[in-house]
Amino acid sequence: QVQLVESGGGLVQAGDSLRLSCAASGRTFSNYAMGWFRQAPGKEREYVAHISWRAISTYYADSVKGRFTISRDNAKNTVYLQMNSLKPEDTAVYYCAADSQYSGSNYREYDYWGQGTQVTVSS
């Protein structure tokens, strides 16, 4: 079992930056691929980015490529999402997810989820 707790969300203006954190506990963090997803009201959960088990590879949705950066610190059991040049369309609840067998963009494949953190970007 893995427990995930997100933090760092908030209300910002367009063009601002935020850094989300996701602290993991319960199992060996480095054995898990980590993903960030988001969900806006009335919409399906959307892939944002993911990072492989030992941070060798990172991947991004086209909508955030060049603006967001995913990273992980296995010594701190934490994954981060640095979000720059935020846009109103980035407004959503952001979730981190973990899985020991899957590393990809399909949210249905991830076994463990945090409770989410709200990001609101005003225009």
Image (cartoon, rainbow, N blue to C red):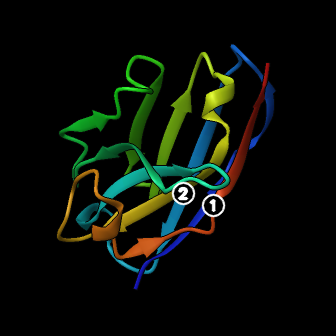
Q: Which mark is residue 105?
A: none
Q: Are marks 1 and 2 in contact (CB under 8 Å)?
A: yes
Where residue 84 sits, quadrant-wise, is top right
Indicate the secondary structure of the residue bearing disc 1. Answer: loop
Quadrant housing the C terminus = top right
Q: Position of residue 81 (x, y in %)?
A: 51, 39
Q: Which mark is residue 116?
A: 1
At horizontal 28% and vertical 51% (from top left) the residue drawn is 105
Along the line of sight, the residue nearer the viewer: 97 or 120: 120
The three-letter amino acid code for the residue at tag 1 is Gly
**Left or right of 14 in this view: 35:** left
At horizontal 64% and vertical 22% (from top left) the residue drawn is 87
Measure how far apart labels 1 and 2 are at the Cα level: 4 Å
At horizontal 42% and vertical 27% (from top left) the residue drawn is 63
User: Is residue 110 positioned above or below 66 on the image?
Assistant: below
Quadrant housing the N terminus = bottom left
Q: Position of residue 93 (x, y in %)?
A: 65, 52
Q: Which mark is residue 95?
A: 2
The three-letter amino acid code for the residue at tag 2 is Tyr
Where residue 64 sits, quadrant-wise, is top left
Q: Residue furthest front?
A: 42
User: Is residue 63 positioned above or below 6 on the image?
Assistant: above
At horizontal 28% and vertical 58% (from top left) the residue drawn is 106
**Left or right of 62 in this view: 79:** right
Q: Position of residue 114 (x, y in %)?
A: 55, 68
User: Is residue 96 positioned above or below 79 on the image?
Assistant: below
Disc nearer the start of the sequence (1/2): 2
Q: Residues within 10 Å of mark 2 (few under 14, many from 20)?
A: many
